[in-house]
């Protein structure tokens, strides 16, 4: 954990690209609130499986940057895309002065088959470095509790090392609710000689049903005691939100106190839950 303790703390927030004009308006309002209250290092915007939200992502990224003046980091996944398609996207972002990219392998939409010039995120990173040198700051994903498709924790760490060695500048983790998993992962990264910032991803708890579905899909563990506690509230959403804010705030404070280099909030395009956590922190 020594490397992370030396790094400047940074805070960021993540959005997904809305499909409607009303959703886009809500996104801009949320981004404006976050700018005033958190003043994030950057906003990130997700990219659908197989590039399914490519146009919406680009529109959201450029408009958020225009309206807030903040740095924006679009997600870019390589599965299902050709080198030329990705180069066209990167050229468009460069023309818009977007200089930070969250580089991912990604997944194909369910039921579809497509050829791709890339199989892994480290190949995308190498491609970007070969074509753009250091024009982009490259974020990558990290999985303290192991990627759900990894053979085991050791092979997953090797994949992460490959991404860093290919030229990644920093990383954002999948969300978790057991901080031991994060610090154990950091220790293993430092033993492997890695020294980039690895920022914990934070998912506010507002809806137990949605949380279990997200967690089952992405492999994030909900500890048994936490699952049973949330189950005890049944449909009492106010109590779930109150307890969730208290628990996640305490977790965030512990992470920062123990040397985490910042926090990345998965906002779900809403400001209330994230700000409730933010305002509880001793920053």
Image (cartoon, rainbow, N blue to C red):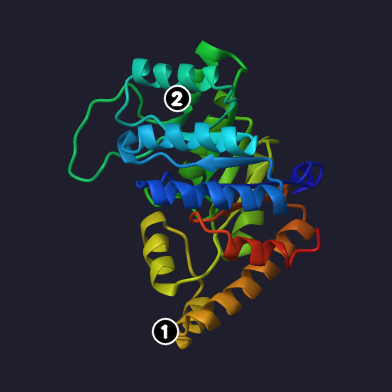
Return the x and y of residue 123 as percentages of the image width and height. Answer: 44, 24
The relative height of residue 27 versus residue 116 in the rendered view (above or below) is below
Is residue 150 visible in the rendered image? The answer is no
Q: Quadrant of the C terminus?
A: bottom right
The residues tagged by marks 1 and 2 sit, at their Cα atoms, a distance apart of 44 Å
Q: Residues within 10 Å of mark 1 (few under 14, many from 20)?
A: few
- Between 77 and 239, the one lying in front of the other is 239
Return the x and y of residue 193 as percentages of the image width and height. Answer: 68, 35
Q: Is residue 257 left or right of residue 19?
A: right
Is residue 179 visible in the rendered image? The answer is yes
Front tag of 1 and 2: 1
Secondary structure under tag 2 reads: helix
Which mark is on residue 235? Answer: 1
Return the x and y of residue 112 as percentages of the image width and height. Answer: 19, 38
The relative height of residue 174 versus residue 225 in the rendered view (above or below) is above
Residue displayed at 47% across by 64% down: 221
Secondary structure under tag 1 reads: loop
- Between 216 and 245, the one lying in front of the other is 245
The relative height of residue 139 versus residue 92 in the rendered view (above or below) is below
Which mark is on residue 124? Answer: 2
């Amino acid at each position: 954990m020594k490397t992370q303790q030396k790094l400047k703390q940074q805070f960021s927030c993540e959005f997904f690209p809305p499909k409607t004009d009303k959703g886009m308006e809500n996104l801009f309002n949320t981004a404006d609130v976050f700018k005033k209250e958190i003043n994030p290092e950057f906003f990130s915007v997700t990219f659908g499986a197989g590039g399914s939200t490519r146009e919406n992502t680009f529109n959201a990224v450029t408009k958020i940057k225009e309206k807030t003046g903040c740095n924006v980091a679009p997600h870019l996944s390589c599965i299902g895309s050709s080198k030329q398609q990705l180069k066209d996207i990167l050229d468009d972002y460069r023309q818009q002065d977007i200089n930070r990219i969250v580089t991912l392998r990604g997944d194909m939409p369910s039921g579809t088959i497509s050829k791709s010039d890339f199989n892994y995120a480290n190949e995308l990173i190498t491609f970007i470095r070969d074509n753009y040198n250091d024009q982009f700051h490259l974020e990558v994903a990290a999985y303290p509790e192991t990627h759900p498709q990894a053979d085991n924790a050791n092979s997953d760490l090797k994949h992460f090392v490959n991404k860093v060695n290919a030229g990644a500048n920093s990383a954002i983790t999948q969300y978790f609710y057991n901080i031991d998993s994060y610090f154990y992962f950091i220790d293993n990264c430092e033993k492997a000689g890695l020294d980039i910032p690895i920022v914990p991803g934070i998912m506010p708890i507002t809806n137990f049903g949605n949380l279990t579905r997200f967690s089952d899909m992405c492999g994030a563990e909900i500890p048994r005691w936490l699952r049973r506690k949330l189950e005890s509230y049944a449909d009492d959403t106010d109590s779930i939100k109150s307890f969730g804010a208290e628990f996640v705030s305490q977790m965030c404070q512990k992470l920062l106190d123990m040397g985490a280099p910042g926090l990345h909030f998965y906002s779900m395009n809403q400001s209330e839950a994230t700000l409730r956590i933010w305002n509880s922190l001793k920053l």
